[in-house]
Amino acid sequence: MSGGALSVASADAVTISDSLFAANVATKGGAVRVRNDNPGAAAGAVSFVNSSFEGNVAQYGGALLVDAGGAATAAGCFFTRNAARAAGGGVAVGDGGAVVLARTAFSSNGNFSCDDAPAAGGGLAVGMDEFKPYVGCTVRDGRRERERGRGRRGFGGARGPARPD
């Protein structure tokens, strides 16, 4: 099952604002999964504005999974107490996915119990094709302590490539 609350699988542009995604469960993207099932079409972006993701659970992307040609932007959003067993307690960006984060905060994301970490990225796991820079984001108390540190590698709670210059 993909996207416990919402699964976007097209090249259309969608904007979701002032919303709460809470206590959703799915295998991929606890609250939302964004992908493009039409590889010949240019990817439309899903934009989340001033929204909160709280207490969502998945194998990949506790709150949000963006992969397979999907694109998403989170601006002024909060990712709190989301959990993933494999990657990205808050957000996971899989191969072919693209994400922009602006003025977005991650707090207390981790694995199913939030006592430990998913295999990669307590707050944010980037997999790996394309990643846009962070703009004014905070990653705090992400649960990934065993190998890669907390947050984003070098920041705390997330895993991914070095921030582009």
Image (cartoon, rainbow, N blue to C red):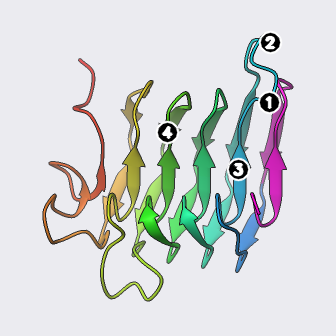
> Residue at position x 78%, y 10% from top?
40
Q: Position of residue 114 (x, y in %)?
A: 40, 84
Amino acid type at mark 2: Ala
* Mark 3 vs 1: CB contact within 8 A: no
Mark 1, secondary structure of its residue: loop
Q: CA distance from mark 4 to mark 2?
A: 24 Å
Residue pointed to by mark 3: 33
> Residue at position x 42%, y 77% from top?
111
Q: Earlier in the sequence, mark 4 or mark 3?
A: 3
Q: Position of residue 48 (x, y in %)?
A: 70, 45
Residue pointed to by mark 2: 41
* Disc 2 residue crowd, few under 14, some 14–19, many 20+, Cα 10 Å: few
Q: CA distance from mark 3 to mark 1?
A: 12 Å
Q: Position of residue 38 (x, y in %)?
A: 82, 22
Mark 4, secondary structure of its residue: strand
Q: Identify the image quadrant of residue 136.
A: top left
Residue pointed to by mark 4: 101
* Mark 2 vs 1: CB contact within 8 A: no
Numbered range of the magenta stretch: 1-17
> Residue at position x 59%, y 42% from top?
75
Question: Residue 40: within the magenta?
Answer: no
Q: Identify the image quadrant of residue 133.
A: top left
Mark 2, secondary structure of its residue: loop
Q: Is residue 73 left or right of residue 150?
A: right
Amino acid type at mark 1: Asp
Q: Earlier in the sequence, mark 4 or mark 2?
A: 2
| Quadrant of the snapshot with the C terminus | top left
